[in-house]
Image: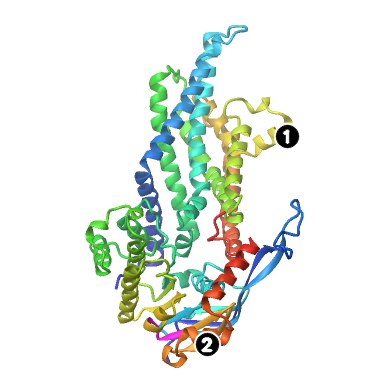
Amino acid sequence: MLTARPPLRGEAHAFLGFLERQKNLVRRYWMWEAVWLVYSLVSVLSIGYLAAGLGSLGGAAPSVADLARAELYLLLGALLWAYLSIVFMEISFSVMWERWEGTIEYTFMAPVRRVTHLLGVCAFALLYGLARTLVVLAIALALFHLDLSRANGGAAVVVLVVSTFPLVGLGVLASVLPLLSPERGEQMTVAVQGILLLASGVYYPVTVLPGPIQVLAKASPMTYTLDGIRATLIDGRGLAAVAPDLAALVLMGAVLLPLGLLTFGWAERRAKRLGLLKRSG
Amino acid sequence: MSQPAVEARGLTKRFRRSGGTGRDGHRLRAPWRRPAREDAVALHPLDLTLEAGAITGVIGPNGSGKSTLVRILATLVLPDAGWARVFGHDVVRESLRVRRHINRVSVEAAFFKELSPWENLVYAARIYGTDDRGLRGRVVDALTRFGLSADVVDQPLRQLSRGQQQKVAIARSVLTTPSLLLMDEPTTGLDPRSKREVQAMVDDLRRESVTTVLCTHDMEEAEALCDRVLLMDRGRVLADGTPAQLGRLEDVFFELSGRGMEDADTEAELEESRAC
């Protein structure tokens, strides 16, 4: 007979189990991981070259300083989107992937609190997203001569850390969609990701968006992450200057994280009531 | 008197299905309207007590309610009415405690197919809170005990045959030392040799006093392995007794339901396709 762990240690052990499982899956699907890495890299580099070519598109020639700023603005947007979208996708697709693998019932039947399960998935998503983005960042830095002389790295890290909470909350909320609808949940998750890309000001200031989309921009935590990171890295602003962004992110984290967990619990009970856990499309 | 492994009273489940077809089999609804909903009864009010340590067979065709019963006990489906307890814990209100007692082997051998048996079993050990000291040795023991060679331990599961995968699934369930093992058609779709081997594994569990609920279509399997048999059809228990008391299950099923098991399966498949 094997010895069962006490509940709290058991939860910690299970948390590590989810991290380890995700790591093993990345290792086994290494070819796909390589493809996604190249895809992220190509996306970021395309934006970088677009920025570098802005001066040769015709019209009034912008100054060198303006071009350098535009290049940094766009590249930071592309890099942050690469990170935020990986984390969002890893979390929001977690239910869908388990359904696709056929393991969803096994995982949901395990003697683990759902919060442990979700935190394990989210922690891996954050680590994995960071690692992949750092690789892309290193290559982008080598190819583009970015002027980061004014950057306030410490403040940027704080913005990124604070952004984690609403981002995780949003990811968990989106992961509920495949639980609500096995047939259409996956498509809806991709649609949510697309809307975030459009509304969060990844490649432009949100002020250029039409009014209704600006409302969405205000509701997206990614808008404040991008705003805060750009202010700290491009203009070298400190924490006081990005306090409104940080406050919005803290508030959104305080709402989205518990809301995500509660909604997931509700959706799980609904799926169990309607017999939707096993069904796959 | 010892505590029953499973107790259920008035356990009921219906599933909502799309429906509404005409005589010619075509849908009656207009394409832009939401499908009409018809409830399909998966489980009529069911009373059940299973003593600890025995192998209970739940036998019946598709749509008889076997899998629904197992899923309710596994906390994967919520009942509409009635209650069920596993070793005294309510499957709805104390689902986490129930999950500490159970494991389930399903017909699909639910695995991450790109991961190896070792990686899948380590994952199971972690989420079931089992001690990881000497885990590698125990995983290899569990696999070799059920006739798998040690060299499959690190191969991706997709490279193993269905029979081998099902053995890994049973080894995984044993590794987590459940008090109640729910086996949902573990031998369906296996070749005769793998089937015999898996049946031998189930028989082995008897020695470890693991309470086992074995859902199967296979009457002979039930007669050979089970201490008690529940014969089910359309969400109801038709007969309940030891294989010796019931006699030839195929005949009992025909006598009580008015149709053969294969006819019942075909009927259930037709109903399912009409509902989709």
What's the residue at 54%, 18% (across, down)?
A: A70
Q: x%, y% of residue B274?
A: 65, 63
Q: x%, y% of residue A95?
A: 51, 53
Is the residue A24 above or below the residue A144 in the image? below
Is disc 1 surrounded by few (<14), some (14 to 19) or many (20+) residues within 10 Å? few
Locate residue B3: give its quadrant.
bottom left
Name the secondary structure under disc 2: strand
Q: Of the residues shown, which amino acid type is indicated by label 2?
A: Ala
Q: Of the residues shown, which amino acid type is indicated by label 1?
A: Pro
Identify the magenta region. B225-229
* Count of number-bearing discs: 2
- Say if the magenta span includes residue B199: no
User: Would you say residue A236 is visible in this rendering?
Assistant: no
What's the residue at 37%, 83% (across, down)?
A: B224
The dot on residue B239 is 2
Is the residue B187 above or below the residue A40 in the image? below
The dot on residue A250 is none
Is the residue B225 above or below the residue A54 in the image? below
Depth check, mark 1 against mark 2: the one in front is: 2
- Say if the magenta span includes residue B227: yes
Q: x%, y% of residue A82?
A: 49, 33
Name the secondary structure under disc 1: helix
What's the residue at 60%, 25% (across, down)?
A: A204
Chain bearing tag 2 is B
The dot on residue A212 is 1
Query: Which residue is nearer to you in this view: B177 or B221?
Result: B221
Locate residue B180: give its quadrant.
bottom left
Chain bearing tag 1 is A
Q: x%, y% of residue A218?
A: 66, 36
Query: Which residue is nearer to you in this view: A96 or A268?
Result: A96
